[in-house]
Amino acid sequence: MPERKSRKDAVRNREAVLTAADALFAGRESPDDVTMSDVAEAAGVGKGTLFRAFGDRAGLLRALYEARLEPIREAVESGPPPLGPATPPGDRALALLDALLCFKLDNRRLTLALEAGGASSSPYQPDHYKGWHGLLQSVLEQIPGLTDADFTAHALLAATRADLVEHLAGEEGVPRETMRAQLANFATRVFSARSS
């Protein structure tokens, strides 16, 4: 019986930490302003609990990102069009890019913190980037006549980098719908040029 209670406590603590971290990232001006101590205090857990559950700040960021991304992942894996696997590849690629852009707009501080990932690490190595790149590349490979899907996926994902999204939405004040339309137009031109 104690083991079951321990597991329930761990699940409850994890949920409390993710909820607290979510609120803190949403409420701070800069993602760098959120510390592990802040999260532990807001969640009502000890720092040791936090570090055991997530390892470090990067682990916490990844867990929060994955939790927020889960509805999109489910739609991509088994949902209906436009994100689901039954969608024609050109339409699906556009929908994937739009979903990623909207996700980053809705989670600006979290994705900024996650993509910053430390000065010495490459932004192209983390699992979250590799996952999006692999998915987009596999969809692009299905577009007739489009060659070099690997590079094209990298180039299109560059248009959704968190620092660019923050610059456009925050500093330049580009409206959400304008950014979505610009990305769709850009991607459509890329598909047309690469497949002609």
Image (cartoon, helix red, strand yellow):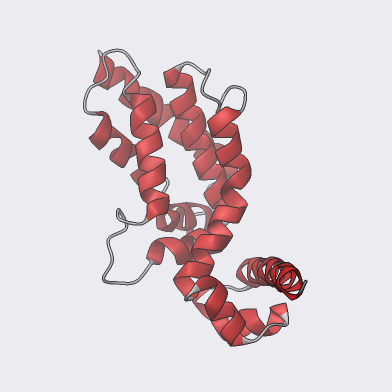
Side (left or right) of 130 relative to 2: left
Out of 120 and 174, give the one closest to the viewer.
120
Give coordinates of residue 179: x percent, y percent: 51, 41
Location of residue 136 (image quadrant)? top left
Give coordinates of residue 122: x percent, y percent: 27, 61
Location of residue 58 (image quadrant)? bottom left
Give coordinates of residue 3: x percent, y percent: 70, 72
- Above or below 2: residue 128: above
Q: List the single residue furthest toward the front.
A: 1
Out of 95 and 40, give the one closest to the viewer.
40
Confirm whether residue 59 shows in the render.
yes
Q: Which residue is drawn at 27% across and 29% down?
A: 149
Q: Which residue is drawn at 26% across and 14% down?
A: 145
Out of 159 and 40, give the one closest to the viewer.
40
Give coordinates of residue 135: x percent, y percent: 40, 35
Viewport quadrant of the N terminus: bottom right
Q: Which residue is drawn at 24% across and 36% down?
A: 151
Q: How many labels does the image show?
A: 0
Out of 131 and 181, give the one closest to the viewer.
131
Location of residue 65 (image quadrant)? bottom right
Confirm whether residue 182 shows in the render.
no
- Above or below 81: residue 63: below
Viewport quadrant of the C terminus: top left
